[in-house]
Structure formats: structure tokens, C-alpha cells
Image (cartoon, rainbow, N blue to C red):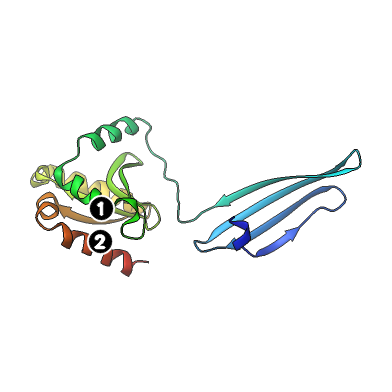
């Protein structure tokens, strides 16, 4: 399906045996395809084995501490009201992009994350009233911004009291940073 939409840029295909390489770029989301052909003639029949590698730049893979998987799962089960309300409003591609909830990156867990746009949405609860929590958040945000992740922050009260306005602001951010 992907290769149909992508014009080949460089392609050397084997005809009488040997190996070849095909590189293509394009598609709606900028897929990069690398196909390696290994061809042979076995018992009078032409056989071609193809390995295809698809690299999707908008689906960057971030490493994370494996211990965070269990914690992220627990956080999904014990979400705050603001997190539940915002998730109901943005899940399933409601804003034209896919978000993940309680997404681990590096040594941290993001409340909501859009891998396509590298956008993190953070909901700050009452524990952010303490100076230590704010300092930890700034350190965490600086580290994740080094990885290319951008942040939009809302307070828990703001999400509960003005969900429509919060969703509109996220939508405006997505349009302005396409």
C-alpha cells in the first residue's frame, strides 16, 4: 500500500541473480522506503526475496526506562478528572492527530503526547503549588525539550472549568505548528 504512493528515486534491481537496492521517498506523511532485493535462479525459477524497511519520521521512537511502563499503566487507571475530561475530548484523532495518554519518554511520563507533532500536554494539579514541584517540572521539561518535545501546560482547574477553551488552544497550537 505504501509503495504504490511512493515514486522510486534510486532503484537497481537484479535480473540474473545477485542483489539490488531500491530507495524511495514520498507519500502523504513522508515515508522513506528502503528495499533490499536478493535474487537468485533456483532450479530454473527466478526467486526474489525482498526486505523492506519503512522509516516514518513523524513516528520517532523515544527510549525510556522500562520500569516506567507499569507506572504509566497505573497512572492511566488513576487519572484526575481533568485528565479524563481532556482525554475524552482529544482521543481517537479528534484534533486530526493521535495522542497517547501517560506516555513514557526517557526517565519521565508525559500526561498526553502526540508523536507526530512532538507535542506534550501537561495538566498541572495542586501539587504544582509547591516550589520544589515547579523546579522539578522545569528540569524535566528542559530535558525533554532537548529531545525536540514541545510543551503546552494547563492547570487542572482550567481543564475542568473550561474544557472547550483548552481543546481550542491545543487545536490552535497544532494548526500553527503543522
Q: Which residue ends up furthest to the right in the rendered image?
A: 44
Residue name at image x 16 percent, y 41 percent: 80
Numbered label attached to residue 6: none
Residue 21 coordinates in the image, percent (x, y) = 72, 53
Give the camera-side residue of 67 and 161.
Answer: 161
| Depicted 71 relative to depicted 39: above or below | above
SS state under label 1: strand
Give the camera-side residue of 107 and 103.
Answer: 103
SS state under label 2: helix
Residue 27 coordinates in the image, percent (x, y) = 55, 63
Residue name at image x 81 percent, y 52 percent: 14
Location of mark 2 (residue): 170
| Depicted 147 relative to depicted 63: above or below | below
* Labels 1 & 2 near each other (Cβ < 8 A): yes
Numbered label attached to residue 121: 1
**Which of the marked residues, 1 or 2, is nearer the chain's N terminus?**
1
Amino acid at each position: 500500500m505504501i509503495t504504490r504512493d511512493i515514486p522510486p528515486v534510486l532503484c537497481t534491481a537484479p535480473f540474473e541473480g545477485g542483489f539490488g537496492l531500491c530507495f524511495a521517498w514520498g507519500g502523504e506523511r513522508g515515508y522513506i522506503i528502503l528495499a533490499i532485493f536478493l535474487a537468485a535462479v533456483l532450479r530454473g525459477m527466478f526467486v526474489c526475496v525482498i526486505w523492506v524497511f519503512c522509516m516514518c519520521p513523524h513516528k520517532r521512537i523515544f527510549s525510556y526506562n522500562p520500569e516506567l511502563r507499569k507506572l504509566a499503566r497505573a497512572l492511566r487507571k488513576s487519572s484526575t478528572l481533568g485528565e479524563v475530561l481532556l482525554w475524552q475530548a482529544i482521543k481517537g484523532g479528534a484534533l486530526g492527530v493521535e495522542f497517547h495518554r501517560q506516555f513514557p519518554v526517557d526517565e519521565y511520563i508525559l500526561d498526553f503526547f502526540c508523536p507526530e507533532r512532538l507535542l506534550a500536554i501537561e495538566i498541572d494539579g495542586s501539587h504544582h503549588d509547591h516550589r520544589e514541584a515547579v523546579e522539578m517540572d522545569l528540569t524535566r521539561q528542559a530535558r525533554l525539550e532537548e529531545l525536540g518535545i514541545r510543551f503546552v501546560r494547563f492547570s487542572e482547574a482550567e481543564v475542568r472549568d473550561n474544557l472547550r477553551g483548552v481543546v481550542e488552544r491545543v487545536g490552535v497550537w497544532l494548526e500553527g505548528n503543522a
